[in-house]
Amino acid sequence: MFKKIYLLCTLMALNLNPLSVDNVSSQQVINPKLDSFLETLKPSLEKINDNIYWAEFFDYSNFGFIIAQDRVIAIDCGWWPGAVTKALQELRKITNKPITHIIYTHGHADHLGGCAALIEGDENVEIYASKDFERYRDEIVSSKLPFIARRANDTFGLLLPKGKNGNAGTGAGPAKYQGKAGYFTPTKFISAGDVLKIDEVTLEVIGAPSDIDDGLAFYMPSQKILFAGDALLRIGPPISTPRNERGRDPMLWLRTLQTFTTYDIDKALLGHGTYYSGSEEINANLHSSMDAIQFIYDYIVRGLNAGVSREDLIANIKLPENLQRNPNLSFYYHSLKWVTRGVYNNLAGWYGDDYRELFEIHPNDEAQMLVNTIGGVERVIQISSEYASQGNCNFAARLVSNVLRMDENNQQAKTLMIKCMRDVAYKAESSSQRNLLLTGAASLEGTYDRSKSQPFVGVVPLLASVPNDRILGMLTTKIDPAETANVDEKIILHIMPENKTYLMNIRNSVLRINEQPVKTGIPTASIYKLDLIEVVVGMKSFDSALKEGSLKTAYLDDVTRFFEFLN
């Protein structure tokens, strides 16, 4: 507290001249280390041996092919069909055998969205996935889905202009829309310990929870090859993310890597990054990755036990020098500090052992008081500009953000914030930090067009594969709390062709949904699942569904009134 008071007094005492902010941003538009790393991510269909080819950097994630006697087996299928098609064209220079099997390492969109390019119109392709695939899929499908898409878009920089002053890529791989992502439901589910035999190809299934907990890896004993999925990488382990990936447990990830050390591996093919070759390189990086995960985890827990604040832990974390020197542990994706913040929050919750968090004040009120204490809006902008001109945009942006809290249209404050965001972004080693800052700057200046975002998977087939209650659950945030504070409206919705009925009740500013038999005395309506999906994703409204007859009811006035709350 005394430090804060001293800082305010110091700021008030400064005698600064008004400054132009035009000179804030440096000429550098990308961190040289990040730039050098991204320059290595060139698309290539790597020949591992005569029957295995690995497609690296055609897409955000890698995928590959096993050429068997009569067929081709694909391990994952990338994210965007346009990118996957380019890799397939290279494969077709080598073999014309049909792709009859696809094996998912896990359920992330970047490993399954591109399957349409590999299936090539053949509806009989077998698709294998973890027995936990459906559980993870159903967890993702919720009212939070738009947030997940928005945060991922911003983190990957997908809507930024392509190039070194915009979307230069990510630490995990190239990031750009290339076609319409799809979704294909697995046809067979497998578990750790299973052995897949397809023609002469034998793959041992390894449980590999890492970036999500449905992960699998596959070992080909005849050739000592590990298909590692996202468990082993060539970047600092992203054991937490800015979007708080559910099921990403550092200790489970570490145990997966420990399991890999028990196999005799000559090649490790990665979901992100250039493959590892030779047992010496593979084991060295397995152990280094485990050491990094263990160090981060223990550092945080040691601090928790000692009562060190979250912000101090984040500010002071450094990997041991031996790990810092390892080029395969550079945090070009999510920064080490961001990973630490995420793991801390997952372990300890929102309170960061900082008593200042216990004094509750509305952020708008705090901004107003701080600006007034310093000497008013012009004074804060003046001081912030001086710090920015001295190269301290991190502090300048935090300080001037108080002005934007008071008036989001203050042009001087906005201009300084935009320049500081870009200045910090262009210096960032982390692609995620860079992309989020550049996204924020473009949003502030009104040049960020979210209408150009594309679905990360085939939304309709994805929703068609999940239980009805998950689809209906996406409606709960559609109501206006103020409008529904004093209502109590109920309908029974019958969903076909499953013949399931759900009680939908709007009351106390919430929408509650429960599966149950039809009750008498409550208005009923019926709709086919695919029509419901079109309404939920915004392809049409409940009102238009009523008018066209896809939403049927004998209680038109009651049902119309109910669904008006969801429009």
Image: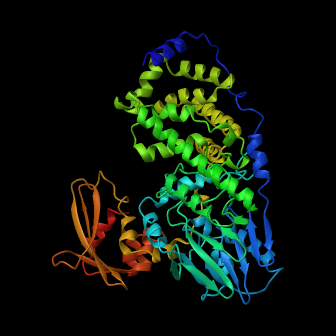
Placement of the C terminus among the 4 image quadrants: bottom left
Residue 174 visible here: no
Up-down relation of residue 149 to residue 552 (above or below): above
228 with respect to 192 (left or right): right
At horizontal 54% and vertical 53% (from top left) the residue drawn is 151
Going by the picture, which residue comes out furthest to the left? 521
Image coordinates of residue 206 in percent, x first then y, are 56, 70
Q: Position of residue 243 (x, y in %)?
A: 51, 52
Q: Which coloring applies here? A: rainbow
- Residue, far right: 93
Above-or-below relation of 99 to 376: below
The image quadrant that residue 220 belongs to is bottom right
Quarter assignment of residue 554? bottom left
The residue drawn where x is 42% and y is 22% is 369
How many badges with numbers are in the image? 0
Where does residue 440 sit, x and y in percent of width and height?
Answer: 59, 43
Q: Quadrant of the N terminus?
A: top left
Q: Residue at x 52, y 82 (%)?
A: 188
Front-lying residue, 361 or 343: 343
Identify which residue, 340 or 450, lies in the foreground: 340
Q: Is residue 208 visible?
A: yes
Q: Position of residue 197 (x, y in %)?
A: 62, 84
Q: Is residue 444 left or right of residue 141?
A: right
Q: Is residue 50 left or right of residue 181?
A: right
In the image, 204 versus 72, the foreground residue is 204
**97 is higher (above) or lower (below) than 540:** below
